Amino acid sequence: MKELKISEAANIKVNGRTTDSRDPLTLLWTGSSLELNVKCTELWVEMAGPFTSHENWIAIEINGEVISRRMISAEKEWVCIFRSKMPEKPTRVRIIKEVQAMSGDPQHRLDIYGLRLDGELLPVPEKDLKIEFIGDSINSGEGAIGAKGEVEWISMFFSHINSYPYMTAKALDADYRVISQSGWGLYVAWDGNKDCVIPPHYENICSLAPGESFKTKGFSGKNDFSSWQPDFICVNLGTNDNEAIKNAGFTDTDKLRETAKSFLKTLRRNNPGAYIIWCMGLLGEDTAVYIKAGMEEYKKESGDQRVEYLSLPEADEETIGARFHPGSKAHAKAAGVLTARIKELKA
């Protein structure tokens, strides 16, 4: 068995926004992953999941299929990914962060330090399609796993692999990134807080991560959009704004229209070639009227016609999951609709 630091390993692929540091590789966003293509009988990965209040979970994918899901220790540990595989046959591996970036936890992260294997690392094939998903708890997979009636807001009930971004990307064989935060909105959060919104953070790597250490490591810095340009951007924001309208006394709905238009300008400025789909509906789409109005104003003023709105199927009694959020069945239905639309646009 040979041991390699991640910072020294060739032919590794990192999916998801992060900094250039690889000592260790730090993953924050949900769905971020380390991807490998190996020829060996046995593979171990050294990792840690430091946290203050919300621990990390990972999923392990082998040759395109998830084979396990587990909690990660806050301290460094060697995790056996597989053993007794045929060494002459390449094995594709992804170590996937299941839990969202935690804006309320100054330590929450997944650190990956090294590899042990008795073989070689091969280049990871690039995919032809790239998709960026932007949203809230729905994109974070909150409640996508767990029994109906579970109400604790804990990491165990977050599951990226049971969410529609994962399912859509898999169906389309796409590389992807997810920018999402539970409870956050387009203009206002679920509780009326106007600071907990995604647009001001979009152009940074992960500036919603709290704590001075993340700033020191560069996560508050500007994202390098030139290094990764999506073919499609799927925005699912507005659900929490509706909660603020219903429960927190928010009445300035013109701000939703204005912010939707402004955010579309930001997305286009940074992603000139992407087709933008604003998709809502898993937990209703009452705010869609304001978002559509902002979208039409944007299209009229800019002449940009590569933008559209797409309704997703609403979760019902059969498909609702934990924490009154869409379950995996609801996510699967949404993924089916979104996948079909992207295929039409690609044709």
Image (cartoon, grey):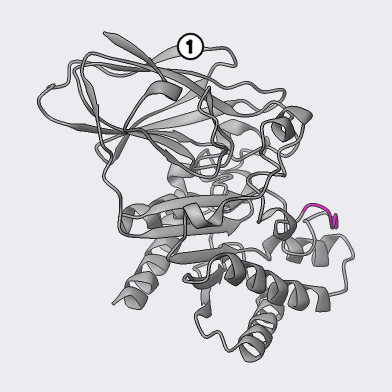
- Which percent across, then down, holds residue 147? 53, 39
Q: How many marks?
A: 1
Residue at position x 54%, y 69% in the image: 279
Q: Is residue 317 visible?
A: no
In the foreground, 238 or 126:
126
Q: Is residue 25 part of the magenta span, yes or no? A: no
Magenta residue span:
192-196
- Which percent across, then down, holds residue 170? 34, 52
- Which percent across, then down, holds residue 173? 30, 54
User: Which residue appears farthest toward the left when viewing the image?
Assistant: 88
Mark 1: amino acid = Glu
Q: Is residue 47 visible?
A: yes
Neighbour class for label 1 at 10 Å: few (<14), some, many (≥20)?
some
71 versus 103 height, above or below: above
User: What quarter of the picture does the C terminus occupy?
Assistant: bottom left
57 versus 299 height, above or below: above
* Quarter residue 74 falls in: top right
Which residue carries the number 1 mark?
A: 77
Residue at position x 74%, y 57% in the image: 200
- Which percent across, then down, holds residue 81? 33, 21
User: What quarter of the picture does the N terminus occupy?
Assistant: top left
